Image (cartoon, rainbow, N blue to C red):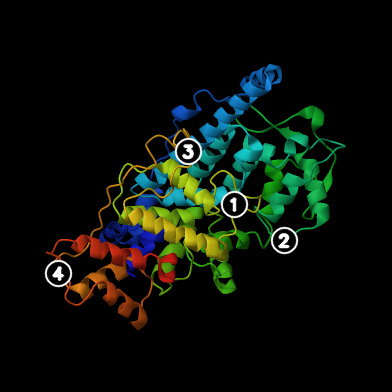
Amino acid sequence: MDNHTLWSLRLGYSAKQAKSIEKTGLKKFLEQSFATKVDSKIPDFLEDSPKSSQELKEIRKTLNAANPEAKKEMLKKEIQVSVEMKSWWIDKMIEEDFPLREKMTCFWHNHYVSTFQKVKVNYWVFQHNQILRGNAFGNFKTLTKKIIQSNAMVRYLDNVDNKKDKLNENLSRELLELFTLGIGNYSEEDIKNGAKGLAGLGIGEENAVYRKFFEDNESFIYLGKKGNFKIDEMIDIIFEQPNIPYLITRKILKWFIYDNPKEELVRYYGDYFKQMDFEIRPLLTKIFTEEFAKKNAGSKIKNPLEYSLQLMNELNISNTNTKLITFFIKEQGMDLFNQPNVKGWDGGNSWLTSQIFLQRNNTADLLCNGKNISRAKKENDNMMMNQNPNRQLNVKLNWNREGNNKEIIAQLSNRLLFQTDAANQQDFEKILKYDFDSKTEGSDNAVMRLFNFMVKTPEFQLI
């Protein structure tokens, strides 16, 4: 696979940026990616969703007074808004000229998990997503402070139930176990004491706030320090711990490059991250520029977004029904805003079970034949109906019309597959024979058959 194509896939979701990376160089491309702006406008689909505590109280009053059918309709409406939000995000992933911010936002989304299924307030989930987007290339400590004090997070990890003399340890535990230090770098006593420092941190208007009546203001020992600490001070103490950088550098390497990164790489980049005072931008620059120079293609299984968006980009499908993409990636185990648990998606081998591989092959058949990636179960399923999901798609594959069969095979292989061997080549030449003529009728169909075969190989599933 061409290295520029490989890194276009790794830093985004398709080969769309390969020419830009080749033309400007990776470092310049990264600088342009870091410079992208964040749109702070609240999307129209959230117009009628509650945004303040007062609005939420009014909604709850209405729900309590409503009959079962009315309650069902109101809940259904919020679920539809959640589907709209997934679609909105996938649109951003597709449309961005520099999609690294969205890819990094998705990384943080799977690190600081907070699901709609538990939070149940779309606006808070949107706020959570915007914090991640705005701080995607910022400072890890700063981002941690902001996201832990989001309404979505205190709701998702039950800190709304964490009160003096009735402590809930969920947020305290995950702050240490999953978000910062990792197992083995803290004690159960630290979790219990951390819950004291978090007691009373609950829902506010724009972000979580402490409520004095529920606070626990007694001194406690936290990671070796004694005091009456609140959340910002607790995070400062966490970031003084010697093993703080390694959990996140391991996860970044896994998200972008290696399903199983070597421990020496994790330590090497983690040490640099600490030197940079936990600034994410220089860390990403170092990782990407140094790993770009290595021959490491085929080291990571594509997640469902990378698989589906690459496929649709290769086939030049416009006016994409992104609601169907959200449905497809959910079926593949990657439901945006609804990870299976606080640990997030496992990634790696979980993206390529036998069932998922079969679904991917079926999807390739559908798209290559001009059909949508998911067929509508009900024609009146209005959550999917911004366009007819059963409509015929206009697909067009770009290929070298002046080339012979081997040149066309080489072109597509270089664009799609991290490696090929003699057996692959023999299979490809059975489809596109030595006497292939691009001027004859049906030549497009022949190349499409070759493309369809290639994207069903194990080699296409890896980057």
Q: Which residue is mark 4?
A: 437
The mark found on residue 53 in the picture is none
- Name which residue lies at 15% across and 61% down: 441
Q: CA distance from mark 3 to mark 1?
A: 35 Å
Q: Amino acid at mark 4?
A: Asp
Query: How would you rate the neighbour count of disc 1 (Cα within 10 Å): few for under 14, some for 14-19, many for 20 or more?
Result: some
Element type where label 2 sits in the image: loop
**Residue at image x 52%, y 23%?**
48
Task: Find numbered disc 1 in the image and state the secondary structure of the residue it sits on.
Answer: helix
Which residue in the protein does label 1 denote? 111
Earlier in the chain: of badge 3 and badge 1, it is: 1
Which mark lies nearer to you, 2 or 4? 4
Say whether residue 323 is visible.
yes
Identify which residue, 320 or 5, lies in the foreground.
Answer: 320
Neighbours of disc 2 within 10 Å: few (<14), some (14-19), many (20+):
few
Is residue 238 or residue 158 the one in the foreground?
158
* 2 and 3 marks in contact (CB < 8 Å): no
Say which amino acid is labelled 2. Answer: Ile
Q: Circles 4 and 3: CB distance less than 8 Å?
A: no
Q: Is residue 327 above or below residue 421?
A: above
Q: Earlier in the sequence, mark 4 or mark 3?
A: 3
Among the 4 quarters of the image, the one containing residue 24? bottom left
The residue beneath circle 2 is 183
Q: Nearer the viewer, mark 4 or mark 1?
A: 4
Q: Nearer the viewer, mark 4 or mark 3?
A: 3
* Side (left or right) of 127 relative to 30: right
Q: Earlier in the sequence, mark 2 or mark 3?
A: 2
Q: Secondary structure at mark 3?
A: loop
Question: Which disc, if any, is residue 378?
Answer: 3
